[in-house]
Amino acid sequence: MKVLVTGGAGFIGSHIADAYLGLGHDVVILDNLETGRARNLSPRAQFVNGSVTDRGLVDRLFAEHRFEFVNHHAARGNPRLSVEDPIGFFEVNVAGGLHVLEAARRHGTRKIIYSSSGGCVYGELVSWPATEDHRLLPVDPYGASKECFETYVRAYGTQYGFDYTILRYANIYGPRQNPNGEAGVISIFARRMLAGEPVTINGDGEQLRDYVYVDDCVRANVLALSRGNRATLNIGTGIGTSVCELFTALSEIIGYGRPPVHVPPKAGEVPRNELDASRATELLGWEPTMKLNEGLQRTVEYVRDCERAVAPPRTERG
Ligand SMILES: NC(=O)c1ccc[n+]([C@@H]2O[C@H](COP(=O)([O-])OP(=O)(O)OC[C@H]3O[C@@H](n4cnc5c(N)ncnc54)[C@H](O)[C@@H]3O)[C@@H](O)[C@H]2O)c1
């Protein structure tokens, strides 16, 4: 099958592109490398360096390839930056997404899989773990843009009759994660600890997040190729882990001896986020399988390898 993966040079999108290639699909990646990296790209995928905001480019790409499926991961993903630049986030995450959706409609695409954010669209949880029916009340322009584009995807499904699956991710982590993204805390901590640098925690570190290993997230995107039509599904473990617990677990894995440095809490940070993924289990047959400690070890190994690769060669003095 011919599949477009937008954002396929990024953290999650590049793993999805690899999985689709592994299944024998013909994969085209559209990414402007804003936060994605060329080194994440498989040579077996066709890479187009461009922006989803370029309407003409997006339409030409669909006209040329006639994609059967679109997996839409391109987005600006840092909630804190969205507070500084709400319009820029709207332009990429909503208007850019709409160019993709519109080209999909015009050129006969069967289905779109969209990566929404269960960490942001619900805002402050009133009940947990949150089901998909929890009220939607994003606290920042990033969350608002992810919720807004969900609404477009569903409206296109209703109006034009094409299939979609909306996946609302919890905090995805693992190799290739950009430390500046929505859930970069694990890669930031790992990098700093391996370098022997101080690690800062915002506030008391008791804020709870639901961490999903990237391979589990990828499996949901593989299952959604054939299941979960017209569904909006949480992808989470339902288990909350505090930032302090993450700090301790990573310190033990790395052998880091310093205490954390607590700094004032960031404004607008919600105290907890855990997602109930029962609907994904029912409709996709999806369940998370990776234990947090094992996932953290794999992430640390990746960060260690990257640091070694960029470290200058040691010179001997004699
Ligand atoms: N990481 C998480 O925990 C998480 C949680 C919820 C939702 N998401 C969503 O998953 C998707 C991927 O996130 P990620 O964590 O892999 O982040 P990422 O920054 O690694 O990936 C985003 C990719 O989109 C590309 N991109 C940005 N603007 C673009 C544009 N205008 N045109 C084309 N490409 C563009 C970037 O270069 C990057 O490769 C995003 O849509 C994000 O909102 C991620």
Image (cartoon, rainbow, N blue to C red):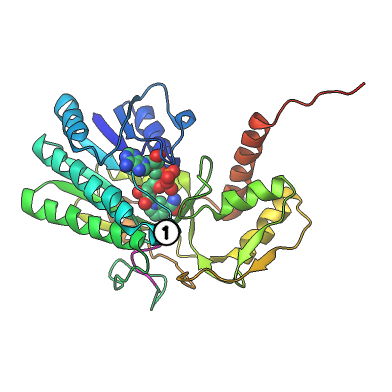
Residue at left offset 49%, top offset 55%: 183
- Count all numbered tags in the image, as a single digit: 1
Secondary structure mostly seen in magenta is loop
Q: Quick check: 175 left or right of 257?
A: left
Q: Quick check: 296 left or right of 275?
A: right
**How dense is the environment of label 1, judged by Cα within 10 Å: few (below 14), some, or many (20 and up)?**
many
Residue at left offset 19%, top offset 26%: 65
Location of residue 20 (image quadrant) = top left
Q: Which residue is mark 1?
A: 79
Q: Is residue 222 visible?
A: no
Task: Provide the secondary structure element on which disc 1 rests.
Answer: helix
Q: Specify whether tag 1 is near ligand 1 (CB below 8 Å).
A: no
Q: Quick check: 80 left or right of 62?
A: right
Give how far across and how far down residue 76 sits, in percent.
Answer: 37, 49
| Residue furthest to the right | 318
Q: Where is the C terminus found, in terms of image quarters?
A: top right
Location of residue 314 (image quadrant) = top right
Q: Amino acid at mark 1?
A: Pro
Q: Where is the N terminus found, in terms of image quarters?
A: top left
Depicted 108 relative to depicted 183: above or below: above
Magenta segment boundaries in residue numbering: 119-123
**Looking at the image, which is closer to me, 267 or 165?**
267
Q: Is residue 294 visible?
A: yes
| Residue furthest to the bottom | 126
Give how far across and how far down residue 144 sits, in percent.
Answer: 30, 63
Give how far across and how far down residue 61 sits, in percent.
Answer: 20, 29
Give how far across and how far down residue 107 sits, in percent.
Answer: 11, 34
Instruction: Find out whether residue 306 is within the magenta segment.
Output: no
